[in-house]
Image (tube, rainbow, N blue to C red):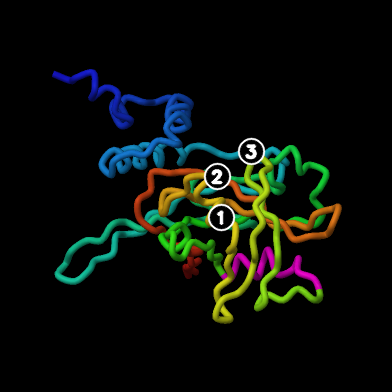
Amino acid sequence: MTSQEDREEPGYGDGEMTNGTEGAYLLLFLKHTILNPVTARDLEHMKSKILSGIELNSPSRSKRKALRIQEPEAPRAAKGRILPRELQFQQQEGGGLFYGNYAPPDLPPIPSLQYLIQDCSKPFEKQLTCSDVKDDQCRLSMNKEDVENNILPLLRNGENLNEGIDVTTYDMAGNEYPMVFKIWATKIHVLTGGWKTFCKDLGLVENQDFVTLWVFRHVDNGGLCFAIHSRRLPVFEPIKKKRPIRQNYH
């Protein structure tokens, strides 16, 4: 006999669910819920099936295509043990790479900044790591390719990454956090300073939290600014961020 508790599990009745809208509402309701690994895997399986048939229409009516998750064949470790499948970030056309069926707007959706954004980068996303949220390290490191494509073009003469650039970072409520954007060991680009406070205020955790970043120049003072949005997903391991390799068939 099936108990009431079983019926309330996110994966219950997955085989009978034919309405994608119902599934989407369920996923939306659970987006901030911390799930155990078994339930999370069941929910991720259901989500992948639902999202595979959904196309995104961007509010800006851009030509950005829907995103999809690609699951390659599970690799094998020593002694034939099968490793967990590796979900990849993928986008078919333009912009950054984002996990899942997600397409952020071109500008940060913060009402108080509506008329204060001058030049702005395209958004890009990062899954938080242990070192991003750990107290004794706590800095946001950024992928070199994302920095080169989205941040370096906004820098001005006299701004020295080795010395650090003072920046203002905004959360989605418009709260300001003074931080420093700099490069460590000539290769690692990081946000430091107020990042630790930002992290604690938003309760960010490793692996499950994904942050979307926009970088822009402030209209009033020309200062370099970051806007950061976070979303929590039922992901409990790091996901390798790889662009798919196109194969030519003859």
Residue 71 screen position, x and y as percent:
38, 54
Residue 148 screen position, x and y as percent:
65, 70
The magenta stretch is 144-156
Q: Residue furthest right?
A: 220
The kind of secondary structure element at disc 1 is strand
Report the Cα–Cα distance between label 2 and label 1: 10 Å
Report the Cα–Cα distance between label 3 and label 2: 11 Å
Which is closer to the viewer, label 1 or label 3? Answer: 1
Q: Which residue is mark 3?
A: 57
Can you see residue 133? yes
The amino acid sitting under disc 2 is Tyr
The amino acid sitting under disc 1 is Glu
Relative to 26, is 223 above or below? Answer: below
Mark drawn on residue 247: none
- Mark closest to the chain's N terminus, 3 or 2: 3
Relative to 48, is 22 above or below? Answer: above
Tell me what residue is drawn at x 39 percent, y 58 percent: 238
